[in-house]
Amino acid sequence: MKKIILKLILLLGFVYLTGCDSNSDAVAGILSALKHDEIVDNNLVLIDKVTKTTTTLFITKTTYYIYKNEASELIAIHYNTNVSDKNDYDYSVTIYNNVSSCDVEYVDDPTNSETYYTYQNGKKSESNKYELSDEKTYNVYEEKPLFSKTKYELEETNN
């Protein structure tokens, strides 16, 4: 019986720690709110999706959406739902306004590395193909009115 309980605790811990990224509906809604509040350009084009995988005691994944704006500059957005119950906000969003593309060596099997990056085209590398800087973080409050579309309100944090 103790083994079953221990396995359940480990399984729940694994699920809790690896569920860090937002679902696609929340991502679309938050992106729409970012555009509506003129925080990002209305005509962003998604050019890549980078998932950082860290394998230590647990596997954690962090996804960055790489967009090109109207001025052909790259920006990255990380949508995070892994917020503590102690906080009053539902999500947090980090926007990197200065993103540059770097040369990386792609690998077939990154299992020797604790951290690796997977791209939208399926390629993997041990270092990030994108250098991210000039970040701003926003807390996102979700409101689900009855018979209406989910609304997102943004508040810039003081990082």
Image (spheres, rainbow, N blue to C red):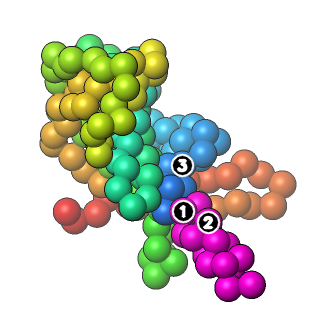
Residue at the image point whose x is 57% and y is 70% from the top: 10
Q: Residue at x 81, y 61 (%)?
A: 146
* Front-lying residue, 112 or 52: 112
Q: What type of secondary structure mainly makes up the magenta span?
A: helix
Residue 73 in sight from this viewpoint: no
Q: Which residue is mark 1?
A: 14
x then y, percent, for residue 17: 49, 62
Which quadrant holds the N terminus?
Answer: bottom right
Circles 3 and 1: CB distance less than 8 Å? no
Q: Give the residues drawn in magenta, as a range.
A: 1-16
> Which one is earlier in the sequence, the residue at label 2 or at label 3?
2
Q: Residues within 10 Å of mark 2 (few under 14, many from 20)?
A: few
Give the residue number, with chain letter if any, for mark 3. Answer: 22
Q: Amino acid at mark 1?
A: Phe
Circle 2 sits in a helix, a strand or a loop, which is it?
A: helix
Task: For residue 17, say whether it is visible.
Answer: yes
